[in-house]
Amino acid sequence: MTKHIWYITKRQIQESDLDSAIIGVDPEQISEDQVIGLHGQVRLRIEDATGPASIFANPASRNYFREMHKRWPWAGYFFRLTPIKSDSSTRAVVDLSLFMSLAFCHCDDLTYCETRHGVGLRYDLSQLSKHLAELQGRAAELAAAVGIADEEIRRRDNLISEAVASFFAAGKALHSNQNHNRKNR
């Protein structure tokens, strides 16, 4: 990992190599000071990922990230997340999209469906909610273990909730704008 960018390669995914992927962010392998310094600071990047569907709709990638979560369930603690708006930076949108892509890997029945705005994604909201709650719980456990104040843990929980809500709000706004533009043509 360089400068808080966690890069997962196509080879690691294809070979199911979790060990080399998580070593730089594994709380059992790095010092408490390093864990504290990475709180909410890590930007995940995945080689050849062209969008959310290339992560959660690819069976190999999907299985890889499910297995990774079993061994490394601290994404809510480490990943840099910012609620997004229409004027958000590309980095913020990519960060949140990757986070949500990983979360969608934990929904069993994902299907594309037609909506009044075009094509949408249908998923089990209770599975997604359960996974996000687990991420928040694990983030709080890790933060407490390394001595981060309860106030900071609550702030991080709120940030995760706001970021996820903003992801869906931005998608809805994007589809509404596209639908409006189509009608005006």
Image (spheres, grey):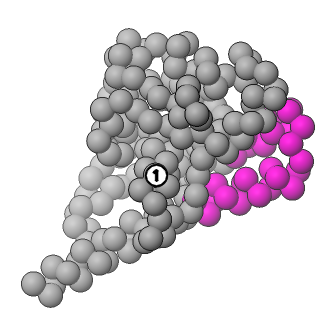
Q: Is residue 26 magenta?
A: no
Q: Is residue 154 magenta?
A: yes
Looking at the image, which residue is at 49% across and 48% down? Answer: 95
Q: Is residue 57 above or below residue 113?
A: above
Of all residues, the one furthest to the front in this rendering is: 3
Of all residues, the one furthest to the left in this rendering is: 185
**Left or right of 40, for residue 173:** left
| Quarter of the rendering occupied by the N terminus | top right
Type of the residue with mark 1: Arg
Q: Nearer the viewer, residue 155 or 103?
A: 155
Of all residues, the one furthest to the bottom in this rendering is: 184
Does residue 14 appear in the picture of this structure?
yes
Q: Position of residue 175 (x, y in %)?
A: 30, 71
Does residue 100 appear in the picture of this structure?
no
Looking at the image, which residue is at 38% across and 74% down? Answer: 173
User: Which quarter of the picture shows residue 41?
Assistant: top right
User: Which quarter of the picture shows residue 47?
Assistant: top left
The stretch in magenta equals 135-163
Q: Position of residue 113 (x, y in %)?
A: 25, 58
Q: Position of residue 121 (x, y in %)?
A: 33, 55
Q: Position of residue 74 (x, y in %)?
A: 66, 34
Looking at the image, which residue is at 73% across and 20% down? Answer: 30
Q: Identify the secondary structure beneath mark 1.
A: helix
**Left or right of 76, for residue 170:** left
Q: Is residue 44 above or below residue 112?
A: above
Main SS category, magenta section: helix
Residue receiving disc 1: 91
The 10 Å Cα crowd at callout 1, few under 14, some 14 to 19, many 20 or more, is: few
Q: Is residue 85 above or below residue 110?
A: below
Looking at the image, which residue is at 53% across and 13% down? Answer: 20
| Quarter of the rendering occupied by the C terminus | bottom left
